[in-house]
Amino acid sequence: MIKIGLTGGIGSGKTTVAHIFETLGIPVYYADDAAKRIMNEDEHLRSLIIKNFGVESYSENILNRVHLSSIVFGNAEKLSLLNSLVHPLTLADAEHWMKQQKAPYIIKEAALMFESDAWKMVDKTIGVSATLELRLQRTMQRDFLSREEVEARMKRQMNEDEKMKRCNFIITNNEKELLIPQVITIHEALLQEAKAS
């Protein structure tokens, strides 16, 4: 079974691309969703988050993402600390999930594929690319954020060009080129590779 990483900057549309792969029958692990679930479910992690980020980090036993975001997105040190607590557990969770899958290939979708060392767990990576302006507009609309807030989050991620250089495949999501044919081309190539291995 081939392990594929799927990544892209904030607002690139990687989740949309992941859903297309899912409709083709490919299992997808969503790292961000898993991280949120683990932050809610893992008692030890929860106590560490409260210790480092305050009791306001949880409201009625549910992660208070607004509170946490307000602390970490303006503070590189705090963001690094949060990532150091959450990423190892998410990587272990992904590893466990991968072992249970039976498809010819599987996908791990993660915004911080290269920043978190998640790329070491996969055989190849697919990058989803979009223009800076499109990414800004999409994220502002989706998350109800100001341009400045989105730009601040983008600065926390690896440069888009650098990220794409590290990927084996690139899907262009610029609202001009159709996504589905691009996904199908990669899907067929990966099925061939899985068959050959």
Image: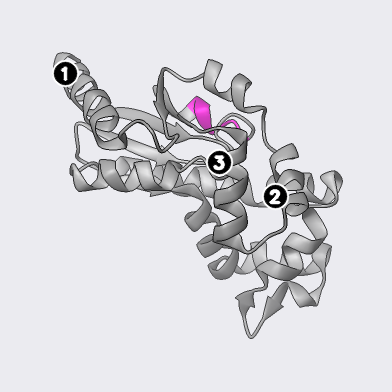
Mark 1 or mark 3, which is nearer to you? 3
Q: Amino acid at mark 3?
A: Leu
- The range drawn in magenta is 116-120
Q: Amino acid at mark 1?
A: Gln
Q: Which residue is mark 3?
A: 134
Give the labeled residue for mark 1: 192
Residue 97 falls left or right of residue 184: right
Is label 2 or label 3 in front? 3
Q: Earlier in the sequence, mark 2 or mark 3?
A: 3
CA neighbours of label 2 inside 10 A, class few (<14), some (14 to 19), many (20+): many
Distance between mark 1 and mark 3 Cα atoms: 33 Å
Image coordinates of residue 192 in percent, x first then y, are 16, 18
State which tag comes first along the sequence, 1 or 2: 2
- Camera-side residue of 89 and 23: 23
The residues bearing labels 1 and 2 have C-alpha atoms spaced at a distance of 39 Å
Q: What residue do we see at 45% from left, 34% from top? A: 174
Q: Nearer the viewer, residue 181 or 17?
A: 181
Name the residue at the front extreme.
176
Residue at 42% in and 47% down: 15
